[in-house]
């Protein structure tokens, strides 16, 4: 049933330009994964749990989690740049 769900873009407005998706790795073994915690309730717990699963089941070498200042603010460019230097895969994640 989950496959029947459409993609919902949560951003306001539409951009006239399209951004190409980054190439996806074949697997996560040995990769460093970065995650951005949006500060919503339980986001830290969810991300730590996901990190443990990525390491134990998928062979991820390390997970780096950065926390935004507030869920309503964009992640600072410096935070994204720093994460991009350290990781091969990144996830923007949120809590409920």
Image (cartoon, helix red, strand yellow):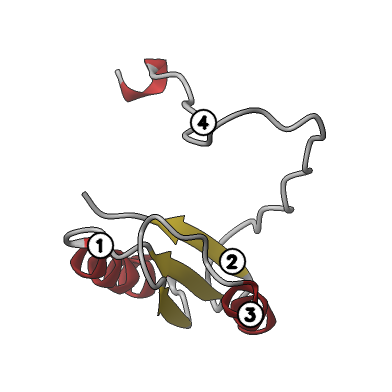
Front-most of residues 82 and 88: 82
N-terminal of the two: label 3 or label 1?
1
Q: Residues within 10 Å of mark 3 (few under 14, many from 20)?
A: few
Q: How crowded is mark 2: few (under 14 residues within 10 Å), some or many (20 or more)?
A: some
Mark 2 sits on what residue?
A: 89
Mark 4 sits on what residue?
A: 9
* Residue displayed at 55% across by 79% down: 30
* Residue displayed at 68% across by 83% down: 85
Where disc 4 sits, the SS reads loop
Mark 3 sits on what residue?
A: 78
Q: In which quarter of the image is the N terminus?
A: top left
* Residue displayed at 51% across by 31% down: 9
Foreground: disc 3 or disc 1: 3
Q: In this view, does 68 lie to the left or right of 2?
A: right
* Residue displayed at 26% across by 72% down: 48
N-terminal of the two: label 4 or label 1?
4
Where disc 2 sits, the SS reads strand
Front-most of residues 83 and 29: 83
Q: Residues within 10 Å of mark 1 (few under 14, many from 20)?
A: some
């Amino acid at each position: 049933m989950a496959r029947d769900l459409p993609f919902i873009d949560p951003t306001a407005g539409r951009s006239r330009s399209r951004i190409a998706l980054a190439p996806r790795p074949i697997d996560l073994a040995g990769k460093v994964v970065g995650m951005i915690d949006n500060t919503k309730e339980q986001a830290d717990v969810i991300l730590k749990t996901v990190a443990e699963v990525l390491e134990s089941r998928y062979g991820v070498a390390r997970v780096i989690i950065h926390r935004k200042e507030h869920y309503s603010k964009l992640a600072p460019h410096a935070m994204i740049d720093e994460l991009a230097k350290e990781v091969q895969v990144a996830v923007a994640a949120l809590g409920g």
